Image: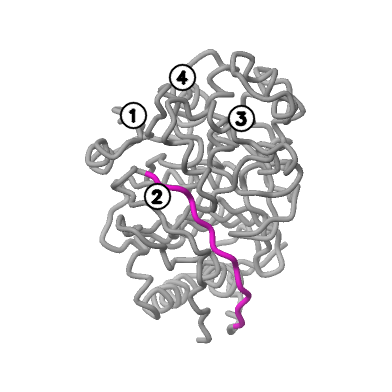
Amino acid sequence: MDLPSTVSAPSRTLASLTALLLAGTVLVSCTSTDGPRTPATSPGVGEPLSSAGVDALRAEVVDYLGSQDIFDDVRVVLVATGDEVVLAEYQDTSPEEFADTRSITKSVMSTLVGIAVDRGLIDGVDATLGKLLPDETMPRAVAGTTLEQVLTMTGGFVGSWSAPDEEFRASRDWVRAVLRDADPAAAGEFAYSDGGAHLLSAVLTEATGMPVLRFARSALLDPLGVDTRPAALPLAVARNAPAYVAADFAWPVDPQDRPLGWAGLKLRPEDLLALGRLVLQQGRWDGEQLVSAAWVAEATRTHVEAYGAAEGYGYLWWVDEVDGSPSARAWGYGGQMVEVVPARDLVVVVASDVDPGPGLSRLAPDLFDYLVDEIVAPRFPAA
């Protein structure tokens, strides 16, 4: 098997996870890889693999995960088509274990914003920050930034690879600091920003009139079967790291008790799979339309060219192509992934441990591009 090489990350040092619960999100540039194609064994979309096909898929996935030492950090690989989980590989973990999903949190926030828009609590993606956050102080140019610009990382907020994007966490009011440090002149250009995503926590609080977790539970997490009780909601500072790590469901908060909008949401692998299935089913779950099909379509199509986990970006979802079929990807630092391939009726979930010490994870997106594009997807032919 011709395997992809590890991709070097941008020259930026992450703060320790245990030093600040969640240091900034780091993306690495993708590289193309060449490898053998696996012949499809499924007779068509929605039709299950034969037992021999499942065994062959499992063998190839296990072989790939054993091909490089860096895959020792991969905890889970799930492959599902329709309502059937055809592959569930766990390494040193269990289905009940909660773990930090890193920037997959952003894609959850996107879905919550979509629900708020669907319900008329937010007046569409053209709504400006000035109207969405009427009690916040911000420069006039920043007040004109639209919700769509925030969702597409084109609002001019400081990028996650620069020091100021970390500095907002040293302030007493993180939202106010993000608004203050924005660069309206850079609006319209893609710049991946943790701080920009965190603004959505304040937007949802203002729009719904309730804490974000309460809204998330009623609108999304409870219907999906996510176990959020009890919930650990520690302030995202170093002294609370042990409690965060020890908790099951957790979502750290800022000094104003707003859950982090960019990372930190702890979920189980099956919860990630539910998120992917919700997208696959165009927002429907158990006969209920949790989020509109129109929002799902807009969130998972390319609005701007990007760099990082894919070459296209939607509403806090990466947009890619898998074995010739369009896909949507929620990606979190260090090997957290939910990949949805509608034409293949396919969801692939990966969850990984991230070394809490300083440094960059070597589990780059291209390693999982190869897993999905070359190993998994070809066994699920497009319609």
Mark 2–mark 3 Cα distance, whole angstroms, equals 23 Å
Magenta residue span: 22-34
Residue of label 1: 233
In this rendering, which labeled residue sits more in front, label 2 or label 3?
3
Mark 3–mark 1 contact, CB under 8 Å? Answer: no
Q: Earlier in the sequence, mark 2 or mark 4?
A: 4
x and y percentages locating residue 5 in the rendered image: 50, 79
Residue 116 located left or right of residue 125: left
Mark 3–mark 1 Cα distance, whole angstroms, equals 21 Å
Mark 1–mark 4 Cα distance, whole angstroms, equals 12 Å
Task: Give the residue type that dot 1 points to.
Answer: Leu
Whether residue 34 is situated above or below residue 376 in the rendered picture = below
Mark 2–mark 4 contact, CB under 8 Å? Answer: no
Mark 2–mark 4 Cα distance, whole angstroms, equals 25 Å
Task: Identify the residue at horizontal 69%, vertical 31% (top origin).
Answer: 147
Front residue (pair 339, 274):
339
Residue of label 4: 211
